[in-house]
Amino acid sequence: MVDLVFDGVVVAKAQVNIALIKYWGKAPAGRPEETNLPAVPSLSVSLDGLWTETSVRFDPDAATDHVTLDGERLEGEPLARCVALLDRVRELSDVASPFAVQSTNHVPTAAGLASSASGMAALAAAAVRCAGLGSGTGELASRIARIGSGSAARSIFGGWVAWDGPAARSLFPRDHLDVAVVIAIVDAERKTIGSRIAMNRTRESSPFYKGWVEQSQDTFVEGCEALERRDLVGLISAMEASTMRMHACAMGARPPILYWKPPSLAVIEQVQRLRSDGDLVLGWTMDAGPNVKVLCPGHDVQRVADTLARVDGVQRILISRPGRGVFVDVR
Ligand code: DP6
């Protein structure tokens, strides 16, 4: 073990991402470095303006790691996830000291967006840098972020990102395709069942899980190829298929998992109506919650946002665009 530890503070900022091709299910884990490997490949885009800022320092006098999020000290399972991630950093750097962590979410709490992705990515980036394991902006940070939350592996990188192995990887820069994401908030409550429990239950009890895993590679390749040729219609088609299949698979679990609310469906219908009217390219996706995210060309975003704001049950609209990768600063 190393006695002398870096005594500065490292601050990292990481953005939220949304999956176009979904991660839903974990591969069986044997060794600790296999924790939270995905059973299926996923493809995401980083979202600008929605991020977590986390400062990390060693605290050799503390008995254990302490983590605050938005001023509140974490305990129980949320703390355990951070500690598992930090344990891996300690293991790799051969440092025994506990960490002191302060984290602030700049994601509207009402958005129901997975802030665990940005949170765990910022934590991993800052801890990796603090422990002298590298820049905190590359492959190692992504592997370590994954331990805290699978989708966080993707939030290390900006723009369009694939995750199909131990770490995520950057596919294309954010300006590769000019799109915007409109987030229709239909329910500001905390989700009824978290994604980790839900995906494990799906794997254990849904008869559709096997089919979900079997088709995942094809949908992933379809999405990546459409993205590569800047084919938004093709990308949307793969995204909606992946979304529907993920939710269908979860609905087949025992007890069933249903994230959709009536206004979610109303938004989806409006998206379909706008599309069949013929002059707009747009598509929808949903994650482990009732809010709907709509992908459209950047120049159409205001029109799409205005139309969705008028759907019954939509409480709020957020607009975002492809964002940057994690930013790390040593103070
Ligand atoms: C529906 O990354 O939250 O958003 O790895 O257990 O922390 P854990 O799960 P998490 O799952 C995200 C699921 C999803 C789809 C996705 O982001 O790919």
Image (spheres, rainbow, N blue to C red):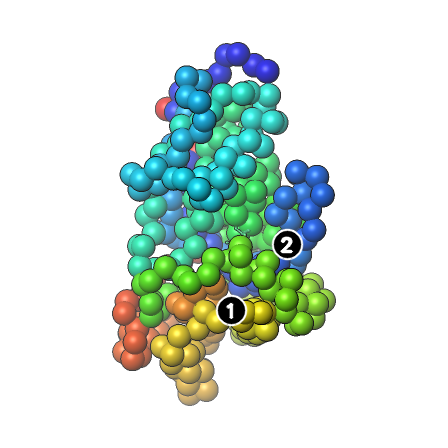
Percent coordinates x, y for residue 13 in the rendering: 40, 40
* Figure quadrant of residue 179: bottom left
Q: Is residue 54 above or below residue 179?
A: above
* Figure quadrant of residue 92: top right
**Farthest residue toward the top?**
3
Going 34% across and 37% down the picture, which residue do you hit? 73
Q: Amino acid at mark 1?
A: Ile
Identify the mark at residue 173; answer none if there is no mark: none
- Per the image, the residue denoted by label 1 is 257
Going 31% across and 59% down the picture, which residue do you hit? 110
* Figure quadrant of residue 223: bottom right
Percent coordinates x, y for residue 175 in the rendering: 47, 55
Comparing 228 with 38, the one in front is 38
| Separation (CA) of disc 2 from disc 1 | 17 Å
- Per the image, the residue denoted by label 2 is 26
Q: Is residue 143 left or right of residue 265?
A: right
Going 50% across and 58% down the picture, which residue do you hit? 195
- The answer, for residue 291, to whether it is visible in the render is yes
Q: Is residue 37 above or below residue 143?
A: below
Percent coordinates x, y for residue 38 in the rendering: 64, 53
Q: Is residue 169 left or right of residue 182?
A: right
Cβ of disc 2 within 8 Å of ligand 1?
Answer: yes
- Identify the element where label 2 is drawn: loop
**Mark positioned earlier in the residue sequence (2 or 1):** 2
